[in-house]
Image (tube, rainbow, N blue to C red):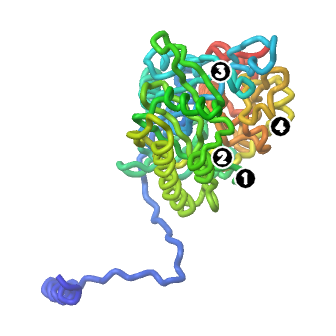
Amino acid sequence: MRRREFSRKALLAGLATGTVPVPPRSAPASEDTYEEPPKKIPARRFDVVVAGGGTAGVFAALAAAREGARTILIESKGYCGGTATEGGTAIHSFYNLYTAFPGVEKRKVVQGIPDEFITRLTAMGGCSGYPEMQTGRDYDSVCTAVDVELYKLLAFEMLEEAGVHVAVNTLLTSAIRKGDRVEGVITESHGGREAVMAHAFVDATGYGDLCARAGAEYSVPDDYASCNSFGLANADIEDYHSFLKTHDAVGQVCPDTREDAENRFVRMGAEALEFPGLADEAKKIGVSLVTTTVRDNYLMFIKCNYKVPGSVLDRDDMARAEIEVRKRMARGAQLLRKHVPGFGRAFMARSSPSLCIRRGRLISCDYDVSHEDVIEGRHFDDDVFAYGFHDMAPRYQIKDGGTYGIPYRALCVKGIDNLYAAGMMITSDHRAHMSTRNTVSCMGQGQATGTAAALCAAKELGSRELPGTVLRDALVEGGVYFEA
């Protein structure tokens, strides 16, 4: 029906009933805000809220629930796992860098719930475990490669076992703050808006969304490229190894140590590959020539890096970046299909649902881990775990193949009494952040903050009132390793 005819009939209907419909009024062009009318929404209460079900958030929720806290995990996607399942290409790293320092003791320095998770995932056939690197030993000592789908499944299984209330497909939209405490958060799902109240909160969103909405101090360094990763099916890592070997370009190599996987690999990378049409074109579009897998005839992770023009916090900047990166990934798959013998029928079989950032907001905490803290291997009276990997190795390595400590203070959000930051949101110095942001560090931060939040809820304490000995004892009980 044409608009004029519709309007005439509506007017006649209105005259017949004594009412005249009021046409919608467009807001003046100068109006760029809208004030929502107040309304009551449902509310529920927990002891601990963990915002973000990514690499840190899963372990924060598990730790809090195992301490007896009624815990809710809020995640915007339909699954948990975050960068560990999306960013690739390996999980770095549960061990100190012993392979780069002859005579240094081999130590599994991240244990506790993260190590339990990897052990269970390996038993499911979804992880390489901890095979030792054959080359690239001055970068990492082991390679822990994962099957992304089994990782997601195990995360759900362990969260259910622990009694965590898992709220996936749920957005955190705002925070309720009173004085120096967060009292609750507002969420939005297909079921509508809801308030979730709690005693303690962990921000593991990666972007620092909860901290920002609670009024925490932050900056946006914008000092990293983002990435997406894709899985390439009908592409065998042994064929890739043969191709690199032919061109004398074999770089990082980690053999597959499974009993039925003799002479196979879980990690393979190119080193100084000079191959017209592949190496130069891959570099132009940001496609990495390092890959990992735990499957035959399938490369689980091929990474495409892209520096977002603008801000990773800007919706429109990120939308343009998402489109560009997907074009580049398709081009990367095409390049590999064209140039690597055996890849002629390869195709993209999966991709991450969105760009993976390496840093969003930098949240101000009570302590800022420095570059010197990391490379000098410093430990603190309030350490919550030890860590020994640096993503800029061999340029930067922890002294003598040792470890450094993440202090509890570095996870306490400045100016707020019951809020923790876990994951890539801490550490201002880019060099130090190239260690603290890595996946296994995020796992350790998750267990530490979840444990602390649960203890604070049980004892009705603020984050800075929690005795260090009480937290340390609980972490040791949870299997966390500390350097003597």
At mark 4, the secondary structure is: helix
Look at the numbered disc 3 and give the secondary structure of its residue: loop
Indicate which disc, 1 or 3, sits on the residue closer to the N terminus: 3
Q: Position of residue 81 (x, y in %)?
A: 50, 34
Contact flag, marks 2 and 1 (Cβ < 8 Å): yes
* Element at label 2: loop
Seen from the viewer's position, the closer of residues 193 and 450 is 450
Task: Quickly name the residue at label 1.
Answer: 221
What x and y, as percent, mark residue 357?
60, 47
The residues tagged by marks 3 and 4 sit, at their Cα atoms, a distance apart of 26 Å
Q: Secondary structure at mark 1?
A: loop
Q: Nearer the viewer, mark 1 or mark 3?
A: 3
- Closer-to-camera residue (45/127): 127
- Name the residue carrying label 4: 371
**Which residue position holds label 3?**
133
Image location of residue 38, percent across then percent down: 46, 61
Is residue 438 at all visible to an observer of this figure? yes
Q: Mark 2 — residue?
A: 359
Disc 4 residue type (three-letter): His
Residue 51 screen position, x and y as percent: 55, 40
Up-down: is 205 above or below 294? below
Q: Nearer the viewer, residue 306 or 185?
A: 306
| Relative side of 279 to 82, left or right | right
Of tags 3 and 2, the one toward the viewer is 3
Going by the numbered disc 1, the residue's amino acid type is Pro
